[in-house]
Image (tube, helix red, strand yellow):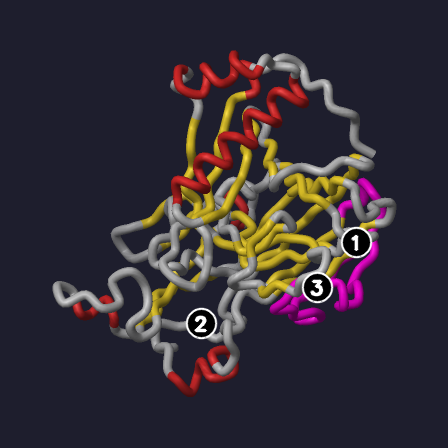
């Protein structure tokens, strides 16, 4: 199995000008070793954010964060095709970290809790689960608090058509920094391809995250990610889509949040009408009447020019058999 080692590539942008680091065939599984969002500068609780420590990253605008592995050239994918990314396995490292820099975050200027605006780092330890790895492990926050790990890919995308986008503030039809908790094992991601080979970038894995990632930093961790790709020829979609075992999710990022919600729902209706053959009025009514319909708020981070990332999710059990063309 082909593998791209950690540190072999470190991209803070997504663009066509970056030469492929790996070439894979359709259906071929491959492994990407990813760095954490802070590029490894936080390893202990004593690694407090400081101007000196952060200078290699904050001297840029936008700052360098979310280093990406890749790009991966997928043979058989052309510009104008729909890339399908199968997320097969995500194994986080033995520790993660979350942090705030001075004055950052939604409560960085709080007078009620001034300590929340002070620089701080918290280390989260990862212990293996039944699989013998951290893919189903336990996150230890402190002696009293732990939870089941739910790792996912925070930043993923392909090279945009013309623009060069950054790994920390970029978001669009091509992907980007979405921090979608459903970008996990067993999920299929659908992305438009804007270049031959698609040029896939992956990084910013999280060991876990609460809805919205309100502070802007989750359980940031290094990871080993196993993926494979398929293609649907000559098809494009309005924005990214996710398919889980039991549900489909229409994704959108925008500000204000109601715009993201409304567009995600409209795109979900379009998906269901076009690919499942459901009558527009039927799914229109079901959106408001079926209690299993969900709106997921994945990322609601203050600042950084990021849109609010939401997902409109609907269970497959209420839909007829899919009629869309098959994968290659």
- Image coords of residue 175 (percent x, y): 61, 51
Report whether residue 34 is seen.
yes
Q: Is residue 294 left or right of residue 157?
A: left
Q: Is residue 169 left or right of residue 9?
A: left
Name which quarter of the figure residue 51 lies in.
bottom left
Task: Compare marks 2 and 3 and give the one earlier in the sequence.
Answer: 3
Neighbour class for label 2 at 10 Å: few (<14), some, many (≥20)? some
Farthest bottom residue in view? 52
Residue 300 part of the magenta-drawn span: no
Which residue lies under the disc numbered 3?
Answer: 15
- Residue 36, relative to residue 47: is it above or below? above
Q: Is residue 194 left or right of residue 115?
A: right
Disc 1 on helix, strand or loop? loop
Residue 15 part of the magenta-drawn span: yes
- Image coords of residue 228 (percent x, y): 74, 44
Magenta stretch, main secondary structure, is: loop
Report whether residue 129 is seen.
no
- Image coords of residue 124 (percent x, y): 39, 59
Gap between marks 1 and 2 measured at Cα? 37 Å
Disc 3 on helix, strand or loop? loop
Neighbour class for label 3 at 10 Å: few (<14), some, many (≥20)? many
Residue 195 numbered tag: 1
Gap between marks 2 and 3 measured at Cα? 30 Å
Which callout, 1 or 2, points to the residue nearer the camera?
1
Which residue lies under the disc numbered 2?
Answer: 43
Task: Compare marks 1 and 3 and give the one earlier in the sequence.
Answer: 3
Task: Compare marks 1 and 2 and give the one earlier in the sequence.
Answer: 2
* Contact flag, marks 2 and 3 (Cβ < 8 Å): no
Q: Is residue 242 left or right of residue 99?
A: right
Q: Which residue: 63% across, 38% down?
A: 238
Residue bounds of the magenta highlight: 1-29
Neighbour class for label 1 at 10 Å: few (<14), some, many (≥20)? many
């Amino acid at each position: 199995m082909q593998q791209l080692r950690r540190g072999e590539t470190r991209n803070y942008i997504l663009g066509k000008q970056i030469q492929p680091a790996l070439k894979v065939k359709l259906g071929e599984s491959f492994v990407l070793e990813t760095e954490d969002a802070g590029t490894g500068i936080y390893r202990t609780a004593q690694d407090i954010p400081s101007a000196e420590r952060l200078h290699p990253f904050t001297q840029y605008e936008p700052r360098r964060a979310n280093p990406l592995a890749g790009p991966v050239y997928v043979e058989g994918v052309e510009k104008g095709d729909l890339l399908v990314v199968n997320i097969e396995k995500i194994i986080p490292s033995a520790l993660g970290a979350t942090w705030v820099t001075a004055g950052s975050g939604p409560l960085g200027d709080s007078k009620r809790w001034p300590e929340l605006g002070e620089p701080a780092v918290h280390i989260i330890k990862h212990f293996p689960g039944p699989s013998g790895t951290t893919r189903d492990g336990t996150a230890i926050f402190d002696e009293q608090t732990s939870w089941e790990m739910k790792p996912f890919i925070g930043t993923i995308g392909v090279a945009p058509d013309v623009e060069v986008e950054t790994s920390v503030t970029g978001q669009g039809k091509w992907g980007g920094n979405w921090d979608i908790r459903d970008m996990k094992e067993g999920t299929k991601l659908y992305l438009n391809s804007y270049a031959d080979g698609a040029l896939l970038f992956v990084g910013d894995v999280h060991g876990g995250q609460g809805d919205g990632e309100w502070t802007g930093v989750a359980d940031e961790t290094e990871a080993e990610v196993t993926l494979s790709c398929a293609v649907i020829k000559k098809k494009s979609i309005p924005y990214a889509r996710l398919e889980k075992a039991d549900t489909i999710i229409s994704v959108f990022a925008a500000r204000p949040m109601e715009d993201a919600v409304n567009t995600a729902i409209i795109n979900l209706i379009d998906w269901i009408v076009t690919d499942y053959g459901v009558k527009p009025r039927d799914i229109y009514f079901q959106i408001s009447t079926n209690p299993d319909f969900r709106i997921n708020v994945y990322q609601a981070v203050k600042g950084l020019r990021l849109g609010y990332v939401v997902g409109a999710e609907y269970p497959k059990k209420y839909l007829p058999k899919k009629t869309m063309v098959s994968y290659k």
